Amino acid sequence: MAFAHTLAGTRYRFPDLKTLLARASPPRSGDALAGLIAASAAERVAAQMALADLPLRHVLSEAVVPYEADEVTRLIVDGHDGAAFAPVAHLTVGGFRDWLLSEAADAAALTALAPGLTPEMVAAVSKIMRLQDLIAVAAKTRVVTRFRNTIGLPGRLSTRLQPNHPVDDPRGIAASVLDGLMYGSGDAVIGINPATDSVEAMTTLLEMLEELRLRTGAPIQSCVLAHVTTALRAMERGAPVDLVFQSIAGTEAANRAFGVSLALLDEAWEAGRALNRGTVGDNLMYFETGQGSELSSGAHEGVDQQTVEARCYAVARRYRPLLVNTVVGFIGPEYLYDGKQITRAGLEDHFCAKLLGLPMGCDVCYTNHAEADQDDMDALLTLLGVAGCTFIMGVPGADDIMLNYQSTSFHDALYVRQVLGRRPAPEFEAWQQAAGITDSAGRLRFDLAASCLLPALPLPEEQP
Amino acid sequence: MTESKPVPLPSPAQPDRWAHLRRHTDARIALGHAGSGLPTAAHLAFQAAHAQARDAVHTPLDAAALLAAFAERGWPAAAVTSAAPDRAAYLKRPDLGRQLSEESQRRLSEPVRAPDVVLVVGDGLSGTAVQANAVAVLEALIPKLQAAGLRVGPVVVAEQARVALGDPVGALLQAQASIVLIGERPGLSAADSLGLYLTWEPRPGRVDSERNCISNVRTGGLAPAAAAAQAAALLAAMFAQRRSGILLDSATPATPPELPSGAVP
């Protein structure tokens, strides 16, 4: 269906929904690279006005990627819950924005609505929202998940401890794990990106973290972020796999480029659940996404990068994951050019995923060829904290020496917890005290000798 | 007036007592803390590393200096530019960095005797890396190639270049193989790392899996002479098997092509 809008005497035409969404999208380099960006600021606003007038239900009838050709579209369409959608079915996209900002849209209403929303609906409304709208609405959502602890409760902010090492050296990784735990990081997951994607490397690292967990009694979950096929083989061989990880995309073709399909993810989810390793819940999938990944594999199907990113969340929610995060600034300046574009994208991704019912975190990050620096990261981190972001990364000194990019540090997490009054997951918080990491008031002690960590890691006992 | 001696106060920044674990990793552990923030020294050390990386990305390649160095050594050379007019366009439009500018296309279209190997020196994401390492690699590499009986074409200095710019260069010169020496994306620990990308029958449309890569050539990384030896061995395998990339059967270790997205210049 074609759309049109007249602004200041100029008539702007948009041949179909995916073009309308692309032209309405706030500017970013990836949409320019794909040739999808609005030709002028005025065209963008005209598209946003046309989008605001669009009945929300129209999004259900016009797929941005053909149903017959794409299993992600089929998942979205076939999985739509019409009854859950009913409370907002009469609204336009603009009316939906107003409703989301209203008091009627409280945590309970948003939770009930989530199965009735599609990625394209939430992407559409995000395009006519300012940052404060994205923050205000996301802050009202409530998504709680559980494996060995409880993530997403009000007043909490969790962290993934990311102790990567360029050659997967267990001692090097153990040193970073210890540093992170002493700084209060790791309640979301201790998650290692392996330099080598192999069953052997994965098993070695998982066994080290399993030993740490068993010897300290920590209510933590571990993950080695290898390809899902590697995790499947590791599980077959009896490795202690807690969370099953995979990078996912918003089209079938882009998922194929990642070497995955819904059938393969189904198999991995099933295998993970069969291990029955969770103690307080069975949310065990961990997904990463990020704007631009579909375009980088030439599989964006003509859809703008923010809308196709939101389609990842339809894939993710099928598996009731423990954790999902966008790796917002990792992919490079050809997709998100500078701090301004990275900031908006991080808040868009968080908003869209939360509205769709996901436990959304963010890797607040950048590469050295992006126009961004630590100040930009501080700004996005603070905004995401206010928005109720589920978790962030904890990387020693914000410098990932394996993936060669900058993320958030253990210190950054302490900062945002302190200024916003956020705490780690309750089970983890109780363990920190019992393990001698925090004092009776919950303050970090920074006293290695008083903690139970050193004997539980493959590190020498020597003193400085 | 009495002279008061300042009383030394303890620093408000607290060190961590596990600094001895630093020998197990280059990660920034045991930084200490000031409140929940970084101590000043650790904060500024990070800023310094980032500044070096940023400068490496944005410092223009000194093509004239490179050409002079090549002339001094008696190597024929040519200078080209990609279709990216400036650094901002280069960073936003990787496709432009993979094409030659019209003028450079014309220059390379002049008839020459087709070389076996064309060497391309491109700025990539770190002009600093090229300036620091390219001549040393070539000094070790060119004699090896000549000793193997290969005709080496002009050394092509390319500004605003991506790896795949070697494809149109190789096609226009009708080279059998190309070696692109290019600045890798700077990390905080190294801003001067050079990569070598080898391609059999370089022609537009080649994909990354059809190349072999030697990375991390820098002081403190792979030495230029070692990189040259690896490149010469890979090239010998390519000429024997008439292919490159993941299909090349070679004993020489090369970085696998499945690098994280965005890491290939």
Image (tube, coloured by chain):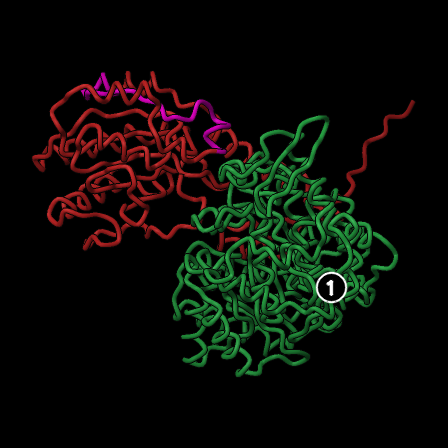
Q: Give the colour of chain B.
A: red
x, y percent for residue A289: 55, 56
Q: In the displayed orientation, state which residue is furthest to the left.
A: B149
x, y percent for residue A435: 70, 71
Q: Amino acid at mark 1?
A: Pro
What's the residue at 59%, 52% (across, down)? A396
Residue A153 shows in this picture? yes
Using residue A290 as the reference point, say whether residue B138 is left or right of it: left
Q: Nearer the viewer, residue A398 or A365?
A: A365
What's the residue at 14%, 22% (across, down)? B112
Q: Is residue A454 above or below residue A49?
A: below
The quarter of the picture where residue A86 lies is bottom right
Using residue A123 as the reference point, say whether residue B21 is left or right of it: left
The residue pinned by badge 1 equals A424
Query: Can residue A348 be found in the magenta stretch?
Result: no
Q: In the displayed orientation, state which residue is furthest to the front.
A: A1
Q: Nearer the viewer, residue B146 or A34?
A: A34
* Viewport quadrant of the C terminus of chain A: bottom right
Q: Which residues are magenta?
A: B70-92
x, y percent for residue A257: 41, 57
Q: Give the colour of chain A.
A: green
Residue A415 shows in this picture? no
Chain letter of mark 1 equals A
Q: Nearer the viewer, residue A317 or B10?
A: A317
Q: Secondary structure at mark 1?
A: loop
Query: Can residue B71 be found in the magenta stretch?
Result: yes
The quarter of the picture where residue A259 lies is bottom left
